[in-house]
Image: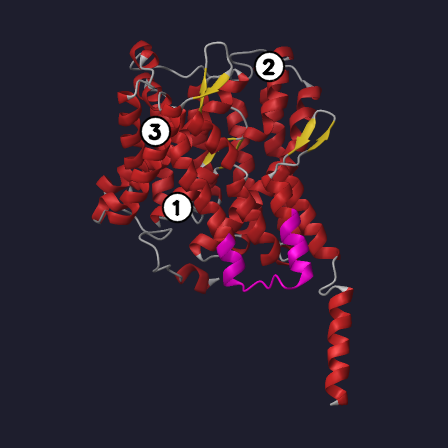
Amino acid sequence: MAKEKEFHNDDVVLDIHDRPTLGHWIGLSIQHLFAMFGSTVLVPILVGLNPGIALFSSGVGTLIYILITKGKIPAYMGSSFSFIVPMVALMKTTGYPGIAQGTVAVGLVYLTVALIVTFVGSDWINKILPPIVVGPVVMVIGLSLAGTAATDATMRTLASGKTTYDWRYFAVALITLLVTIGFNMYLKGFVSLIPILLGIVVGYLVATLMGIVDFSGVLAAPWFSLPKFQIPFVTYHFHFYWGAILSLAPIAFVTMTEHTGHIMVLNKLTKRNFFVDPGLNHTLAGDGTASIIAGLVGGPPVTSYGENIGVLAITKVHSVYVLAGAGMFAIIFSFIGKLSALIQSIPSPVIGGISFLLFGTIASNGLRVLIDEKIDFNIKRNLMIASSILVIGIGNAYLQIGQYQFSGLAVATVLGIALNLVLPQKAASEREFEENRSKKKNRI
């Protein structure tokens, strides 16, 4: 344990406990805020919730997560997409009070599992999640989002609600991607640490020149805007909605697989083992508590964000202070109507162009796991496991059971774990080949 505390990753610009200067701190934190903003506010917009509250709850949730994980894990908590379908249905029946109870129930499921892990331990993690499972799962986390990035980069939503291909969108996305790559490769000093932020700014300016940005929301927004909090016993009458609880709570087991996958990526990036220190029980407890708080103020369930992990990988700035700063800015911005509206006005092709790089970086880290561990794909066992995970996960071959939908990532992860546990180390034909080769050698 002492060695783990003393470890410092000298291969990065800022390690987990390195504190940047104030000026750098602000820029780096805002970069993370921009990276997660589109997705975090998109969830409440799709469901019909207040985006300001989602921004507030994501910021508070991030700070709580960092506190519970003892300041050892650089992660950002944003609105989860896994609960959109049942939340949309609940908005038509129970309204937000039902969603709130389901969100709190999700957090309680996380805390219950965290308590079990506390007593049972987490040594089983290495047994069920070896490199041959971890690598492809991490690749799926990045590549399964490729379709979302491509849609953002090419499709424009019409007033009727339909989408159509727009070459201007693709042009903005490509320019955003290329300038961000250029910033990564050719800039020096502090500006080399904020290529994502600079890429978004350039992309935003290009989109403005091409007439894509809509400023109406910014002009109409007040400077100060108090988020419309939804607090039980204060803003609405409390009543148990068991159906809502049963609709959302089971999906927590799906998002836990994604949570575990994100921890795997962070382990690889930071050269640490967060399953051991601070422990899977703390990471689950942090995630669960963040969702409980979100449910008590009016937000959707939250989870760790792949977008921000992508920022960590590209910038090599892993400081937990930067992520905490992003959480604080999210809270502040949720009260400043103009700023929230300005960030919300970032057009989808800019987000899509940045996502090409962020999601691709996550996938590349999964590939690096396989390379670093020297996984041999001449062995049939490895080929069977990786192939199944990649196609099911990237293709999003989801499992629908009643109103519950388990994402392709969740299905791929569970299948990969199962195959790793039941398949023999070598196929029968491989054993036969080795036996025959051994017999030939003995004859000689």
Above or below residue 125? Residue 304 is above
Q: Nearer the viewer's eye, disc 1 or disc 2?
A: 1
Q: For numbered disc 2, what is the local secondary structure?
A: helix
- Check disc 1 and report the residue beneath it: 312
- Check disc 3 and report the residue beneath it: 172
Q: CA distance from mark 1 to mark 2?
A: 35 Å
Q: Residues within 10 Å of mark 1 (few under 14, many from 20)?
A: many
Q: Overall secondary structure of the magenta stretch?
A: helix
Earlier sequence position, callout 1 versus callout 2: 2
Depth check: give the residue in front, 200 or 222.
Answer: 200
Q: CA distance from mark 3 to mark 1?
A: 24 Å
User: What residue appears at the point 32 percent right and 32 percent down from the top-left corner?
Assistant: 200
Residue 358: image quadrant is: top left
Q: Is residue 434 left or right of residue 337?
A: right
Q: CA distance from mark 2 to mark 3?
A: 35 Å
- Check disc 2 and report the residue beneath it: 91
Stretch in magenta: 367-388
At label 2, which amino acid type do we have?
Answer: Met
Q: Nearer the viewer's eye, disc 2 or disc 3?
A: 3
Earlier sequence position, callout 3 versus callout 1: 3
Depth check: give the residue in front, 281 or 80.
Answer: 80
Give the label on residue 261, or none: none
Q: For numbered disc 3, what is the local secondary structure?
A: helix
Q: Can you name the residue that lies furthest to the bottom here?
A: 444
At label 3, which amino acid type do we have?
Answer: Val
On the image, the x and y values in percent for residue 392 come to: 64, 42
* Number of numbered labels in the structure image: 3
Q: For numbered disc 1, what is the local secondary structure?
A: helix
At label 1, which amino acid type do we have?
Answer: Leu
Depth check: give the residue in front, 167 or 303.
Answer: 167
